[in-house]
Amino acid sequence: MVTLKEVDDYLKSLANGKDAFGEATQDGPDSRINGVLVHRDFTGVYVTERQRQLWERLRQKFGQDSNGIGMIFTYSPYEYEEMFREDSA
Amino acid sequence: MTSWCRLIDALVIRQSFIVWSVWKSGMPITAAEYKEASGEVLRAAENAHQSGDYVASHYLCGLAVECMLRALRWRHNRAWEGRHYLKALAEEAKYFDLISNRYRPRFVTQFNDLTRRWNNEHRFYPAEKLEAHLIKLNVGSKSSDRLFVNSAEMVEFAHDLVGIGVAKW
């Protein structure tokens, strides 16, 4: 069974380059591992294609254990920044 | 039976089991469980899309957003809501308050696009009937790839609409 740390480390290793970010989270001990990966290579790429590329790597890395991984949200740095940008006062 | 039928059957059985469990135990589904389900269902939608099961992914995208809205709504109102009207759930969940004014128009557009296309009854729709529904809404230009285009866009909408709920949890 894949662990939170293994997935977190792997997402961080994929998050190379400027403004990249990777993090895994788990709501409870029996929950699936979720996460987020922010990478400039996702800019202008459809979500379905981002997910296809990411899951190819996750399956390569973790094999059958990747079934323990739930949703990894994929954003470009611009999308991620915009999502958390607060309105100016 | 096609694989998407099996997928939907499995989800319907799972949902029925949850409803039965709630009835039996009197325990409501919690916000955390709805949130967890939203990620699982979205993942299932993407799997269905990658497998070419575009009708299944269409339905599951709406279901994933509904799970997230129910998770957020639970914080304001724990009463059981049996209807599947996404706009009402979003209102009760104060969903758009999560999003900055600057970013809101994009999300409102995505949300409106998804709710315009999706209905809970679509779980019963065969491909031909869903395609007829999409033609009425002017989704896609060629019949050869209408279901594919719709599915890809629905995954896009659901990814962002569920994602904002997870990010701001």
Image (cartoon, coloured by chain):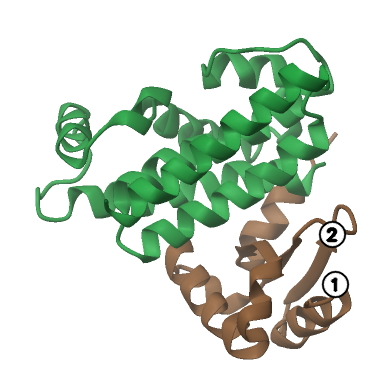
The answer to whether one can see residue A85 in this image is: no
* Distance Cα–Cα, label 2 vs label 1: 7 Å
Of pointers 2 and 1, the one earlier in the residue sequence: 1
Question: Which corner quadrant holds the C terminus of chain B?
Answer: top right
Chain letter for mark 2: A
Mark 2 residue crowding within 10 angstroms, few (<14) / some (14–19) / many (20+)? some
Residue A59 spot, x, y in % from top left: 58, 82
The lab-note entry on whether marks 2 and 1 share a chain reads: yes
In the image, B83 versus B86, the foreground residue is B83
Task: State the mark number for residue A30.
Answer: none
- Judge left or right: residue A20 versus residue B124: right
In the image, the chain rendered in green is B
Three-letter residue code for mark 1? Leu
Label 2 sits on a secondary structure element that is strand
The residue pinned by badge 1 equals A4
Mark 1 residue crowding within 10 angstroms, few (<14) / some (14–19) / many (20+)? many
The residue pinned by badge 2 equals A26
* Furthest-front residue in this view: B24
The answer to whether one can see residue A63 in this image is: yes
Tell me, yes or no, whether the two marked residues, 2 and 1, touch with CB atoms within 8 Å.
yes
The residue that appears at 51% across and 16% down in the rendered structure is: B85
Residue A85 spot, x, y in % from top left: 76, 48
The residue that appears at 63% across and 32% down in the rendered structure is: B17
Chain letter for mark 1: A
Q: Colour of chain A?
A: brown
